Structure formats: C-alpha cells, structure tokens
Amino acid sequence: MADPRPPFPDPDADPAELARSASLDELQRMKAAEELHRLRSERTARRSRLAIAGQVLVGYVALAGLVVNAYQSWTNKQQQEHRDRTELEKWNKEFARASQADKYRAFFETSMLATDSANADKRLVGYALLQEFVRDPIYDEKAMIMLEESLSQELRGAPRDKLDDVRRAAVRAILTSLAGTDDCRALQRAARSVDRVARFHASNRDDGETREVVDVYVRRLVGRAELVCESLKDFRTVRQPIRDTMLANPELLGLNAPTDAEANLLMASILVQKCEEEMTYSGASECPAILRAYAALCEKGGRDPADDRAACEVVQEAVARLPRTSPGAPGGAP
C-alpha cells in the first residue's frame, strides 16, 4: 500500500522553490528534523570533548605520577648516598682511631723493649723495631729521641777499654734505625747525634773504638743520605756534623792538620771500602745504588766545591769498577 503522505522535500533544493512547493506542515517537520539533527550533533560533540578531556586528564595524572616517582626515587637515592657517606666516614674514623690506638700500643711496647736494661737481646730487638717508627711522621721525632738517648747509654755503659760485642751490635742497630728515614732533614738531625760519639771518645780516648763507631755513621747515615737527599747541598748538611767531629779529633784521621777536603776524601774512602767489603759477601746490598747516587750528586752539583772534588773522584772510580747490570736489576744503573 502506497504511503499517502507526500514525499519529504529535498532540504538541499532552492529555498524559494522549496517554499512554493512544500506545505507549512512539511516545512515545520523539516525544521524540527534539522533541529533534532543539530541537537544530536551537539550532544555527540560534547561527549567527544568530555572523552578527550578525560583522556588528557588521565595523561596529566599519569605524567604527574611519573614525575613524583622520579623525584621520590632521586630523593631516596640522595638519602641512601648520604647514609652511605655518613657510615663510611664513621667507619673511617673508627678505623683511624683503632689504628692510632694500635700504633700507640705498639710504640709503647717497643719502647719497653728498647729500654730494658736487664736484657741486651730485648734492647737489640727494640732498637730494630724503632726503625719502623722513624719512618712514621707522627712518631719519628719520639723514636729518634729514644734512639739518640739509647746510643748515649750504650756508649756510656761500655767497658772502659773497648766496646764489647753486645754493645757494638746495639750501636750498629741504633744507627741503622736512625738511618731508616726517607726524609733528608731527619737524617740531618740523626747525624747530629754524633756528639755522643765525641763524648765517648773524650771519656775513653780509644781512637780505634771511636773510629769504628764513626765508620758506622759513615756507612749508615752518609750512605743513606746519598739515596734520599736530592742535592749535593743537602747531602753536605748531613755529612757536616760527622766531618766536623773527625776534624775536631784529628787522631781519628791519622793526619796532623787535616783540611775539609782531606776529611771529605777520607769519609768517601771509608764508604767505598765498607761497601766493597759488604758487596763481597752480600748479594742484596744497596751499596751499588748508594755509590751511583753519590756519583749522580757529584754530577748534579756542577762546579763542585774544591773540598769535594777528590771525594767525588774516589766515588766515581768505585762506580766504574761496579759490575754492569741491567736497568731493571736491583742497584742497576738508572
């Protein structure tokens, strides 16, 4: 059955033609349809905007959460690092305190050994152990004072005629410990302890015994100075107290009126002789390095003072007699 209603006018037709051909009822229905379509479109658009706004809001919330999490992670990391640093500093301080306490206790126990008047063997061990404290910047001055006073006691307690074997070994151990430092200025102070030897010589007037102690000074302190002093001037400062003691007692040199040059030459000859004797029986001697260092100081000095030329020549001749070694070998040429 056919629809009795006339067909719906085409809304895209010409408005004038549409007004003439369409009835009032049709125009009203078309207007209502357009209004309905418009309202439906607006509602759909509002829903779309609300959905987009919701999605944007969710994105902002998620981004804010990421920022908060990142900040919280950074804050936690900073707090953990601060706790780690605090804990590390705490343990470092505790370790340093414990180390200082252990070192103080070790120094006290070593001092007890070095001052044991009843047992010469314990004193000898104490003198040897004090060498470790001579190298310590905290205890070096205390250790050197103890060694210097011990040297006085060992020389003062010697028999009237000569040093016995026990005290000779003690004197050698004391001087070896005094020479154990790596500081040239500390060696300069150690060399001034030779005044104890001068007092010993004044009391017993035994040239042989005093010369033996002086020889140990030359081998240990002067030899060590050649390794740790960087200039001929500093080396001469270490050597000067020993040389002046020998000049004040010319009988030790075997000369009537010795000069500075003759005293320097004699000390260089003593060092070369002691080193050559040592190298004949010791394969681990530091004498090759000592002699080479002495020769290097002579070369570094440029125009040597006149009182050092003969001594430098003796040492350079001794270096020329040394066996050639590879640069990497102990005591080898640099």
Image (spheres, rainbow, N blue to C red):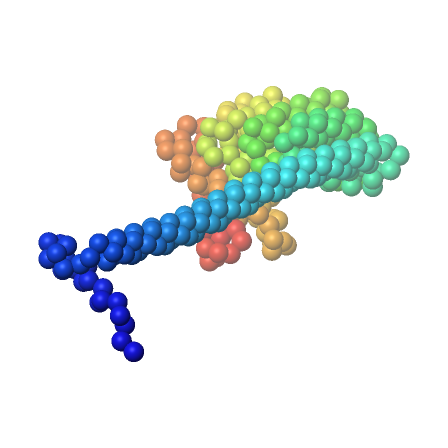
Asked whether 87 or 200 is in front, the reply is 87
Counting from the top left corner in percent of width and height, residue 250 is at 60, 25
Identify the image quadrant of residue 273: top right
Residue furthest to the bottom in view is: 1
79 over 2 or under it: above or below: above
**Residue 169 percent across, percent down from the top left:** 75, 40
Q: Position of residue 90 (x, y in %)?
A: 68, 36
Residue found farthest to the right: 118
Q: Nearer the viewer, residue 3 or 110?
A: 3
Please indicate, yes or no, whether residue 35 appears anywhere in the rendered image: yes
Classify residue 230 as left or right of residue 24.
Answer: right
x 41%, y 27%: residue:
305
**Residue at figure coordinates x 63%, y 29% from the top left:** 190
Residue at image x 60%, y 50%?
285
* Screen quadrant of the N terminus: bottom left
Total marks placed: 0
The answer to whether residue 56 shows anywhere in this view is no
Q: Residue at x 55, y 31 (%)?
A: 184
Which sits in the foreground, 72 or 108?
A: 72
Residue 230 relative to residue 146: left or right: left
In the displayed structure, would residue 311 be above or below residue 245? below
Q: Position of residue 27 (x, y in %)?
A: 22, 55
Q: Nearer the viewer, residue 45 or 21?
A: 21
